[in-house]
Image (spheres, rainbow, N blue to C red):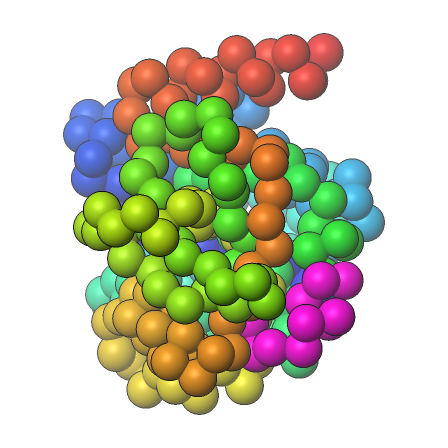
């Protein structure tokens, strides 16, 4: 399975930390955050990787190159004139993508078996599948996903408080390439607005539910939690 990592954002929430460094390149245990994501993929046999870069993207390209030193093959899709959002970045990379592909946020680490995620995507037969965390351990993110009994996403609402929102988007999904046809060329748009909402309306967004919490590096507290985690597992 091919993997696409979205690593082009500004990281404005992190202030001075990302003034001269892209968020995905912030160091943890002596390596950039993105390194740990790529090694997770490589350890599972996922070696075909596309990285969507934008803000200070040359730092990503200079560090990882073609990926051969890490045992993977990396290609880059770069937003040059302006950032296009997560959906727009995927659209720009469309020509590089296979029939379906794994999409990961470049600021989220989710240590699940992505081969199982792929198998569930194929079993359920929908145009896309989102990994949903059941939020038994607080990640600092409010519940934003509602599912029906068939593992179909029926609502995705980042600002909602409804009791039917029992899960959290975990920063990983498998998307069929045909779903990118919803997004016009060159338009700035998020994955949520460009793809997910349209698929939900057509009952074409399935879910893979996991009890494995994910690690986000958007706040000092979250970065500390991940730093402790990766220090343990990298030994």
Q: Residue at x 72, y 11 (%)?
A: 235
Is residue 200 rendered to the left or right of residue 100?
A: left
Q: How many marks?
A: 0
Q: Residue at x 47, y 60 (%)?
A: 147
In the image, residue 29 lies at what x, y percent? 55, 16
Q: Is residue 234 magenta?
A: no
In this picture, is 29 found above or below 83? above
In the image, residue 44 lies at what x, y percent? 79, 45
Magenta stretch? Answer: 119-128
Is residue 184 rendered to the left or right of residue 207?
A: left
In this picture, is 166 found above or below 117? above
In the image, residue 70 lies at what x, y percent? 73, 40
Q: Is residue 120 magenta?
A: yes
In the image, residue 98 lies at what x, y percent? 66, 76
Can the viewer see residue 30 in this picture?
Answer: no
Q: Residue at x 59, y 67 (%)?
A: 150
Q: Residue at x 67, y 67 (%)?
A: 121
Of residues 73 and 85, the one nearer the viewer is 85
Q: Quadrant of residue 112?
A: top right
């Amino acid at each position: 399975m091919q993997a696409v990592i979205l690593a082009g954002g500004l990281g404005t929430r992190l202030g001075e930390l990302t003034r001269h460094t892209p968020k995905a390149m912030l160091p943890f245990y002596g390596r950039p955050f993105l390194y740990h994501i790529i090694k997770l993929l490589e350890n599972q046999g996922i070696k075909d990787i596309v990285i969507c870069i934008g803000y200070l993207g040359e730092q990503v390209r200079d560090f990882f190159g073609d990926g051969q030193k890490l045992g993977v093959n990396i290609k880059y899709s770069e937003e040059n004139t302006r950032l296009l959002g997560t959906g727009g970045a995927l659209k720009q990379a469309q020509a590089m993508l296979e029939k379906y592909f794994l999409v990961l946020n470049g600021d989220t680490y989710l240590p699940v078996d992505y081969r199982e995620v792929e198998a569930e995507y194929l079993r359920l037969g929908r145009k896309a599948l989102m990994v949903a965390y059941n939020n038994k351990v607080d990640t600092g993110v409010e519940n934003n996903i509602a599912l029906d009994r068939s593992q179909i996403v029926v609502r995705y609402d980042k600002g909602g408080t409804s009791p039917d929102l029992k899960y959290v988007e975990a920063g990983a999904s498998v998307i069929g390439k045909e779903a990118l046809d919803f997004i016009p060329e060159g338009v700035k748009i998020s994955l949520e607005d460009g793809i997910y909402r349209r698929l939900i309306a057509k009952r074409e967004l399935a879910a893979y539910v996991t009890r494995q919490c994910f690690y986000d590096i958007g706040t000092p507290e979250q970065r500390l939690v991940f730093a402790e985690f990766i220090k343990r597992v990298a030994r």
